[in-house]
Amino acid sequence: MAARDENTDAAGHMDGIYRYQRYIYDASRKYFLLGRDRMLDGLDPPPGGAVLEAGCGTGRNLILAARRYPQSRCYGFDISSVMLDTARQSIARAGLSDRITLALGDASDFDARSLFGRPDFDRVFISYAVSMIPPWKAALPMAMRAVAPGGSLHIVDFGQQAGLPHWFKSGLGTWLAKFSVEPRGDLEQELSRVAAAIGADLKFERLYRDYAQLAVVTRRN
């Protein structure tokens, strides 16, 4: 199957999952998408910097980032057109349409200049989307390519729940599978390879007894 056909199938699949879920997504996910605000706190872009979210979903994170860093310009893209509709509405209600730019795009195959008219960003982040991208290993170097010299890529997502009871891990895995979510047990190893390939520095943390994992890859100047 051609890459374009695969991308179309992935977009349709995500639209199907979130056509109605998007209306309750933020309210229902805030209790278990842990570590998102910690990741946003760690972005700390330079004054006048540019921030990109790959897989921006409802726009929740972009709105918070724009409010926390009022001197920055924010950008986001998602493969789901219905999620982008919700994001645009939420951003407009927040009065941030002049500071947040959205586009339709695939995290595993995108060109920042084509989407936003600029080649790179001071901060790029992916929040609980790596676990939803089938070709996720392709998405990591793509995201890193959009990071400007001296900038950083920030990722938060599900861990392996190694420090939590087996029944909890099993139940969570079953529930996540209903939404095509698959925690990436080898995320640290893949990020290590991406960082080594370009001489970047990786910081990796396991949060809340490995419920979540948080990574920062910093590109050297």
Image: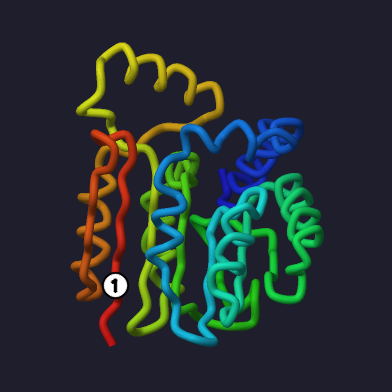
Look at label 1 and name its amino acid.
Thr
208 to the left or right of 44: left
| Residue named by callout 1 | 218
Q: Quadrant for residue 115, please give it.
A: bottom right
Residue extending farthest top: 167
In the rendered image, residue 174, in percent from the top left (x then y), is placed at 44, 17
Secondary structure under tag 1 reads strand
Report whether 126 appears left or right of 10.
left
Considering only vertical position in the picture, is 58 above or below 104?
above
Q: Position of residue 36 (x, y in %)?
A: 45, 50
Name which residue lies at 24% across and 44% down. Answer: 206
* 216 lies above or below 4: below
Q: How many marks?
A: 1
Name the one closer to the observer, 7 or 142.
142
Q: Residue at x 58, y 60 (%)?
A: 64
Q: Which residue is drawn at 56% across and 43% down?
A: 1
Would residue 100 be found to the left or right of residue 170 on screen?
right
Mark 1 is surrounded, within 10 Å at the Cα level, by few (under 14), some (14 to 19) or many (20 or more) other residues, namely many
Image x and y of residue 175, in percent: 49, 19
User: Could you say where residue 203 lies in the image, as x and y percent from the top left?
Assistant: 22, 61
